[in-house]
Amino acid sequence: MSLGEIIALIIAGIMVGFINTLAGGGSIISLSILMFLGLPTGVANGTNRIAITLQTITATINFKKQNILDSDKGIRLAIPTVIGSVLGAMIAVDLNEDIFEKAIAVVMIVMVVFIFIKPNRWLVNHQDLIDQKITIWQYILFFFIGIYGGFLHIGIGYLLLTSIVLGVGYDLVKANAIKILIVMMYVPFSLAVFIWNDEVNYKYGFTLAIGNVIGAYVASKYAIKRGAEFVRWVILAVVLLTSANIFGIIDLNEIFKLIQ
């Protein structure tokens, strides 16, 4: 690895760790930089999960220290997600990634509509929903979210946030904490599938992880300090950037070339 590659990966990791911890969609940056540096799509997909694993461990510990993480409900929701993620990772090589990228862009746009049509629903707890037991339909929903996360991971944060906020009743800050816990639990299992299939570059993965951990630490502190309103606007900015890249309005790969 050259010094330029190391610097590029760490800078990208900081951005990804920050964005993923506050909202989601940051993995499109890390996957783009990994592919730009020459990794095949499948290897980039697997390598990215090393950084995501360490990033989520850092953020989860920080959220736990701040007493905003509902570990019990988060673990219960993570179980079907883990199972789904293993299945998603196993079929990742055979499915058309372009179809999934377009689908997640649509989900992101819908997310923006939710944020601005019903902002109060995103910003406050709904204790009546929080007090309810998890339903069989929620377990099924998180299983399918896990399938997507195991396959591509890009945008998984939006799917989890939508389900946790609208379905379980938490505000964005607390929902973010649960989201991070769920991702922390399922990503190692999907990573194991990629390792088994020899689709991981460890040097790039651990270098990227240095940045991810820094970004995750800062973001988990900042989100707590600024609250759900700040997170809402970060989500909007990331949705617009990610959707524009997926639909070809901008090209992150070209931006990285200009930086290089």
Image (cartoon, rainbow, N blue to C red):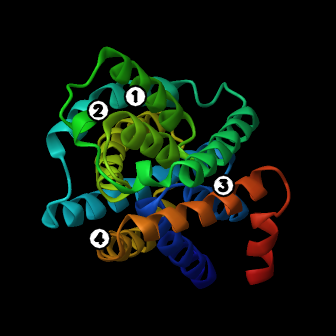
**Would you call the spot at circle 4 few (<14 residues within 10 Å), some (14-19), or many (20 or more)?**
some
Mark 4 or 1, nearer chain start? 1
**Would you call the spot at circle 3 few (<14 residues within 10 Å), some (14-19), or many (20 or more)?**
some
Label 2, label 3: how far apart the Cα atoms are? 33 Å
Mark toward the viewer: 4 or 2: 4
Residue lying at 39% horizontally and 43% vertically, measured from the top left: 165
Quickly name the residue at label 4: 224
Query: Is 2 located above or below residue 110 in the figure?
Result: below
The circle on residue 77 is 2
Label 4, label 1: how far apart the Cα atoms are? 25 Å
Quickly name the residue at label 1: 142
Which amino acid type is marked by label 2?
Leu
Q: Check the picture and name the quadrant holding the C terminus.
A: bottom right
Which amino acid type is marked by label 1?
Phe
Instruction: Report the front residue among 241 and 95.
Output: 241
Q: Is residue 98 left or right of residue 89?
A: right
Mark 1 or 3, nearer chain start? 3
Label 2–label 1 contact, CB within 8 A: yes
Label 2, label 1: how far apart the Cα atoms are? 7 Å
Residue lying at 39% horizontally and 64% vertically, measured from the top left: 228
Label 4, label 3: how far apart the Cα atoms are? 36 Å
Mark 2 or 3, nearer chain start? 3
Mark toward the viewer: 1 or 3: 1
Label 4–label 2 contact, CB within 8 A: no
Residue lying at 18% horizontally and 47% vertically, measured from the top left: 70
Quickly name the residue at label 3: 39
Q: Check the picture and name the quadrant holding the N terminus.
A: bottom right
Instruction: Report the front residue among 254 and 22.
Output: 22
Which amino acid type is marked by label 3?
Leu
